[in-house]
Amino acid sequence: MRIKDGFKVVNYHGQNTVVADAAAKGGLDNNIVLTDTSLFLWNLLKGRDVSKTEMLDALLENFEISTVLALSDIDVFLRTMKENGLIEE
């Protein structure tokens, strides 16, 4: 999985927000604000293919988080990205 080209994160009023750049077709229908863990996952998936297992390992290595919570965060992140057409598989 990877983040599709044409989208980036900008800091808008202190919140990390996903926006479409000029190359993205259709833009975004929703505002997507990223938490610290979701921003970490975004950066992990931007520009390269990453498996769910690699995402889990990276979260556990970089955050003080349980495996259960990390898996839940990954699932919510992926669902949100897929629902908004931001993920390539």
Image (cartoon, grey):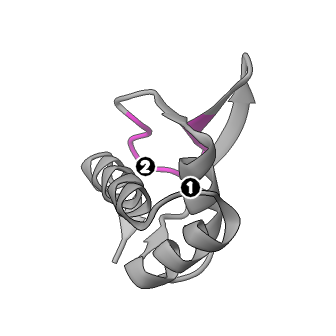
23 drawn magenta? yes
Residue depicted at x 50% and y 82%: 54
Per the image, label 2 sits on a secondary structure element best described as: loop
Which residue type does callout 2 highlight? Answer: Lys
How crowded pointer 1 is (Cα within 10 Å; few <14, some 14-19, many 20+) is rated as: some
Tell me residue 39's x, y (percent).
Answer: 61, 49
Percent x, y of residue 49: 51, 83
Residue located 44% across and 39% down the image: 27
Residue 62: image x %, image y %? 69, 66
Quick check: can you spot residue 23? no
Number of numbered markers:
2
Name the quadrant containing residue 40: bottom right
Mark 1 / mark 2, whichever is N-terminal? 1
* Residue 73 belongs to the span the image colors magenta: no
Q: Which residues are magenta?
A: 17-28
Badge 2 is on which residue? Answer: 25
Query: Along the line of sight, which residue is nearer the eye, 16 or 87?
Result: 16
Could you tell me if the residues under marks 1 and 2 are in contact, i.e. CB atoms within 8 Å?
A: yes
- Name the foreground residue: 67 vs 85: 67
Residue 30 sits in quarter: top left
> Quick one: SS at disc 1?
loop
Q: Height in image: 79 above or below 22?
A: below
According to the picture, the residue beneath numbered tag 1 turns out to be 6
> 12 and 69: which one is in front?
69
Q: CA distance from mark 1 to mark 2?
A: 8 Å
The x and y percentages for residue 65 are: 54, 57
- Is 47 rendered above or below residue 83? below
